[in-house]
Image: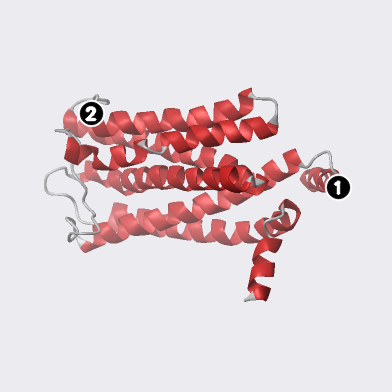
Amino acid sequence: MALAQINWFKYSSPQAFYPLAGRMIPWFATIAALLIGVGLYIGFFVAPTDFQQGQSYRIIFVHVPAAWMSMFLYVVMAIWAGLGLGLNARPSFMMAQAIAPTGALFTFLALFTGAMWGKPTWGAWWVWDARLTSELILLFLYAGVMLLRTSIDDPRRADRASAVFALVGVVNVPIIYFSVRWWNTLHQGASVSMTAAPKMAATMLTAMLVMTLGFWMYSIAVTLARMRCVILERERRSSWGMHHSHREAVEVH
């Protein structure tokens, strides 16, 4: 037990985590590419055509996993931000900073694919539906976290301010999830629930879950890569940081 604790805390140091992240990125990236490829193939070529929406429904195999990841990553970012505030731990703040852009990307992807699905289904690219509006607010929250950090010169103040903002904004996540229950919305209810049987064919559910897992692996790979960039940026004045920055520059050229 003591040995496991020593190994765990070893990687809480940015200098120790940096090479570990570099070794993990190719694995997660490869798994992500394979899963997303399989998920797209099942969703676009194997899953049956929906009897109501026709072929246009296939956008859900990107839209739904992206929407799930947008909410999941915000919660994870808020958890890391909370750990940073509670433990005054720089690596926790750095991890929250690394997660934010990927969460914003999936939020934008969910909104964009939702608009593509909404045009043939509702006859409009956008409606001020409760689910769509709360998802748009989530994108603004991600943007707020990132902009607040860059607008403050002192890294410690930026960390704490953006962390508080992230924690306050987490209240929007349950609003997104329960919006279709709380209000009369155009957006359809959940097709997958922890408390009820799926409302879709097995191949559709398989494609959606494989895509979600692929997006998850992608998020880990990209977050680790961004975490390495954040570490180098923050440690650039130390001898360790200057050495690795120079090494990265040489490898690029």
Q: What residue is pinned by disc 1?
A: 243
Q: Quadrant of the C terminus?
A: top right
Mark on residue 26? none
Is 18 positioned to the left or the right of 35 in the image?
right
Q: Residue furthest front?
A: 86
Q: What residue lies at 67% left-to-right and 56% top-to-bottom? A: 12
How packed mark 1 is, by other alpha carbons closer than 10 Å (few <14, some 14-19, many 20 or more), is: few
Secondary-structure class at tag 1: helix
Q: Quadrant of residue 200?
A: bottom left
- Given residues 153 and 118, the one toward you in this image is 153
Q: Is residue 12 visible?
A: yes
Secondary-structure class at tag 2: loop
- Given residues 91 and 225, the one toward you in this image is 91
Q: Residue furthest left?
A: 52
Q: What residue lies at 72% left-to-right and 55% top-to-bottom? A: 13
Q: Is residue 115 visible?
A: no
Is 125 positioned to the left or the right of 189 in the image?
right
Amino acid tagged 2: Asp
How packed mark 2 is, by other alpha carbons closer than 10 Å (few <14, some 14-19, many 20 or more), is: some
Is 41 positioned to the left or the right of 251 in the image?
left
Q: Quadrant of residue 135?
A: top left
Q: What residue lies at 52% left-to-right and 39% top-to-bottom? A: 100
Q: What residue is pinned by disc 2?
A: 129
Residue 4 at what x, y percent from top left? Answer: 64, 72
Quick check: 104 above or below 27? above
Amino acid tagged 1: His
Residue 111 at what x, y percent from top left? Answer: 35, 33
Residue 227 at what x, y percent from top left? Answer: 64, 46
Task: Work out how far the residue at label 1 is from the one at label 2, CA to CA, in angstroms.
Answer: 52 Å
Q: Quadrant of the N terminus?
A: bottom right
Q: How is the image coloured?
A: secondary structure
Residue 58 at what x, y percent from top left? Answer: 27, 46
